[in-house]
Amino acid sequence: MSINFSNLTRGLVIELDGQPWEVIDYERHKMQQRAPVTRIKMRNLLSKAVVERTFQQYSTGFTVADVDTRPTQFLYTDGSFYYFMDQETFDQYDLTKDVLGDSLEYLKELAMVDIVLYNGSPISVKMPTHVELEVTDTPPSFRGDTAQGGNKPATLETGKVVTVPMFITPGTIIRVDTRNGEYTERVS
């Protein structure tokens, strides 16, 4: 499906040079006695690179990429592959560490995530905004030990280390923001 500039929206995935690009921002400039210039800031869904491109044609056309997001559940890993099952069709997808990237720091067995498919094959994983993880190790807190603001490092069940308040102990389940990797609140 082909669209023009007036149909662009933030978050739309277009296809350029045979690769999917997510539109982050866009604008069109028209100067006197010149053709309009279209600037698009976009992120490559395969390489995660962010670029800004300028199109100088009067009627720039774009092709919408064949991208689909499927709800899946993380099943298990065998060390080199991570296996996910589609919750609607029960298809299974195997992804590598390279494809998962930073999502591995928040991924635990039976977690629900969205897999992004490009032309039918998985290219990335969309984590929920917040995940709940158990604290496995953190140093003990001592009374009056608040000279540094009352925070300490804690290792989570996935191996990620976050900064938590002094009252958090091993075995506590906390909520972590996957966008910035910071502690949000104690769950239990």
Image (cartoon, helix red, strand yellow):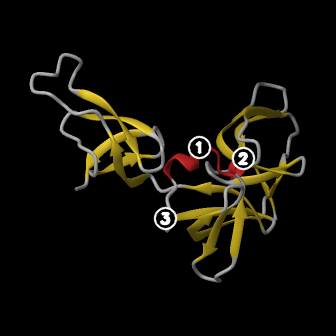
Q: In the displayed structure, would residue 101 be above or below residue 120? A: above
Name the amino acid, label 2: Asp
Query: Of label 3 and label 2, which has the lower sequence position?
Result: 2
Residue 56's x, y, as percent? 86, 34
Residue drawn 88% across the image and 39% down it: 57
3D distance between C-alphas at marks 3 and 1 = 15 Å
Q: Which mark is residue 98?
A: 2
Q: Which mark is residue 111?
A: 3
3D distance between C-alphas at marks 1 and 2 = 9 Å
Using the rendered view, name the quadrant where residue 69 is placed.
bottom right
Residue drawn 39% across the image and 36% down it: 162
Relative to 172, is 154 on the left or the right?
A: right
Quickly name the residue at label 1: 102
| Crowd class of label 3 (few under 14; some 14 to 19; many from 20; radius 10 Å) | some
- Confirm or deny contact between disc 3 and disc 2 (CB under 8 A): no
Q: In the displayed structure, would residue 66 be above or below residue 24? A: below
Quarter holding the C terminus is: bottom left
| Crowd class of label 2 (few under 14; some 14 to 19; many from 20; radius 10 Å) | few
Q: Nearer the viewer, residue 32 or 130?
A: 130
Whether residue 36 is visible to the viewer of this picture, yes or no, is no
Using the rendered view, name the quadrant where residue 71 is placed.
bottom right
